[in-house]
Image: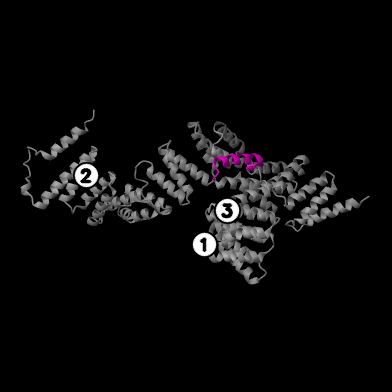
Amino acid sequence: MSFRPAVVVLALAALAAPLHAVPPVRSEALGPVESARRDAVERFLRARLFAAEGEFQEALKEFRRAVELDPEDGHLRREYAEALRDFGILPEAEQQARKAVELVPESAAAHRVLGQILLSKARDKEGIEAALPALKRANDLQPAEPSGALALGQAYLRIDRNVEAAAVFSRVQDRPRGPILPLLYGEALEKSGKPEEAEEVYQGVLRQDEGNRGATLGLLRVYQTTRKFDKALPLLAELVVDQPGNLGLKAQYGFALLRARRLDEAEKMFKEVLEADPDNRDALRHYSSLLSERLETARADELLKKLQGLEPDDADVSFRRALNFLEARRLDEAETVLGDLRTTLVAQKAPAAGVASVDGQLGYVALLKKDWARARAAVRPHLFDEDGSVNLQALNLLTQVAREAEEPAEGLKVCREASAKEPKELAVRSLLAEFLLRSEKEKERAEGGEILVALAKEGRPGILAAADVWQRLENYGRAAEVASAGLVQFPDDPDLLFRKAASLEREKKIPESIAAFERLIELKPDHGAALNYLGYMFADRNENLERALDLVTRAVALEPSNAAYLDSLGWICFRMGNLDEAERHLLLAKKLSPDDPTIEDHLGDLEEKRGDLSKARERWSRALALEPEDGGAAIRAKLERAAAAAKAP
């Protein structure tokens, strides 16, 4: 039985009936203003009681009468505005809130209510921005007041002013109002590019509420963004156990397993989902990616064609089909799919960004075919996006064409154009420096060197960019110096360690290089590039072959379709005398990278080992024609040796 109506009656009676012990205060003893204020308070209390009982119409009548009795009371108007807001009568609520702000301009509550009402009405960015002045004024007056901070922070989040949202939420984290404020704070930190801080906030929520779904999902986003799949997987596994029939969750778990390079487990999960629902779009999409990585191109394309039948208007599916063929270096098929997709996008008047992405891949196909003119023609029109900013995909491809075509002047020209648009963009500056340093003009080379010196003083991203440029210019001593100096500022940074180790190896400083690689692998056991590089170093020196095999096998498990890793694995097998396995891996590497002189050279060594000098000479000759990095001195020596052997009686 509810006793609330009785409480209301008693309360009203208390307002109406005089106490016998105290002489009543007669209205005629008060002046008109005081009497009106007293009556306004009485009406206000009645309104609150009616509102508590859900008698909205009666509550509003009492509020209106109270305001009529005391129209200059800003706090009363603010209460009335709140009631109107809660009852969904927003136009009148806004009117009353504005009057409240006018009457009590230093009232944080009045500004807060006005801002909340405007935010409730907002349907676009302009509407949200209209609410911000009132919400910010309220927050300035009471920065630690939770409801005002909540409204202001949410408004900032809705218009992607995430850093400001995080600052607002940070000031109310010690105010206990349940998980909503810390969850929003975590979201703001995520979107501000501070995933580590967001992770700490979400973990704090889970310490208070172990089963909080919002915090769990927030952590999953953080871990996927930061590629901490080892941390994401246990959370997803628990969710899958709790919801065994949730196929979408299982598909997400499979995708996380795929990203964590646990390919067999990922495949098992995708198969389980597709067995229960053969048309599950997420499972089809992610499983096709797995198969494509394993170079099971036909099976991947079957899944993608099925997905295309389910989503005929989704251009992304056609794009994935093209990338699947491109991964296997089936260039003609990739080009056909991309061409058809481009025709469709143009006919549909699709956004320019979509057409630019397709043209970027068509340019890449042309690059792989060494058709420099077609590569440039595909991407040159997209060097600048519609907003005038530099399209870095187009710039990178155009500069790669300039490198491979040995046309540094063309590369410098396009970099100058990009720099004129975005002179402060890190990628643009580093590419400009590279092609200035490739110039035959001393003044331009000096300019390029100055840019790299400046970049190396601009924190970790600048240091990495400078080291990369020196590596591309084959000045490995300078690259090692830059990376080593960076490691003083950023000790044990994996990216800097890799650049230092690789550069030292090219400088023939093998012990120092090995030490740097060993430290990197100790810090990041799944660093595929480091595993491969160190394993190949051992194999090339014909030492520590068992360790080399372990290292490179781990690298291939992480990236099964990486041609360089497969070449390393084949070379190790060759060194260990397992020629059949060596051939299998080397031929697969050649399929993925048909114009790699190192792979061709290794295949020549394999043929020589088998006693077929004729085939060996063919392989070595082709490797020499592909212009190996060292100029081909070692390959020429092999060809001369083979020629001498052929002439011997």
Q: Residue 549 falls in which quadrant of the image?
A: top right
Tag 1: amino acid: Gly
Marks 3 and 2 in Cβ contact (< 8 Å): no
Residue 352 location (% of width, % of height): 54, 56
Dominant secondary structure (helix, strand or loop) of the stretch shown in magenta: helix
- Secondary structure found at label 3: helix
Q: Confirm whether the magenta stretch covers residue 362.
A: no
The disc at residue 357 is 3
Tag 2: amino acid: Leu
Residue 180 shows in this picture: yes
Residue furthest to the top = 1
User: How busy is the neighbourhood of tag 2: few (under 14 within 10 Å), some, or many (20 plus)?
Assistant: many
Tag 3: amino acid: Ser
- Secondary structure found at label 2: helix
Q: Residue at x 81, y 46 (%)?
A: 607
Q: Residue at x 56, y 58 (%)?
A: 391
Residue stretch in magenta? 292-313
536 displayed left or right of 100: right
255 displayed left or right of 628: left
Label whose residue precedes the other's in the sequence (1 or 2): 2
The disc at residue 60 is 2
Label whose residue precedes the other's in the sequence (3 or 2): 2
557 displayed left or right of 642: left
Front residue of 522/207: it is 207
Would you name the residue on which mark 1 appears?
388
The disc at residue 147 is none
